[in-house]
Amino acid sequence: MVSVILAHGKGRVQIGYNLAKALYFAYMPAVMFPKLAIASLYLHIFVTRTSRITTYITISVIIGICLSGILTVSISCLRQGCRWDADLGWSDRAYRYLSILNIITDFVLLVLPLPVVYRMQIKTEVKLGLILTFFCGSM
């Protein structure tokens, strides 16, 4: 990071930092809303109590991830330029943990409809097509 500061000057680095914060404010809702749309679709499809409870829990976690990410960006590094320090602060660890939770919710949204598709009384080819569709949708 020192070479970036020396090559481009501290002013450009600060502009990059502010741009990264602005992009993260847009990124969190951009990830949350498609996941919530998929989860709300699952609520219309699922009839078993376990599936619906799992979907509601997943929705809660997705909203919590978004709010936590926005809060972390809002309060991280109140002094200017601390994001560019060599030491990984608490905000970088928070981003890492939020990313792990995002991956877990992606996996849950992938696996959640599989038992419903498996129990459907349709041809195996159609089941495989549905499973592939859900798999591609979760990517």
Image (spheres, rainbow, N blue to C red):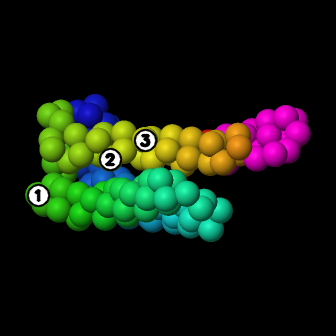
**Are dots 2 and 1 in contact, CB under 8 Å?**
no
Mark seen at residue 109: none
* Residue 114 visible in this rendered orientation of the protein: yes
The residue positioned 57% from the left and 65% from the top of the image is: 43
State the residue position of label 2.
Answer: 98
Front residue of 84 and 29: 29
Q: Amino acid at mark 3?
A: Ile
What residue did someone put label 3 on? 104
Residue 38 seen in render: no
Tell me residue 112's x, y (percent).
56, 47
- Residue range corresponding to the magenta coloring: 120-137
Left-right relation of 33 to 20 = right
Q: Secondary structure at mark 2?
A: helix
Label 2 neighbour load within 10 Å: few <14, some 14-19, many 20+: some
Give residue 98's position: percent from left, percent from top. 32, 47
Q: Residues within 10 Å of mark 3 (few under 14, many from 20)?
A: some
Query: Could you tell which of marks 2 and 3 lies nearer the N-terminus?
Result: 2
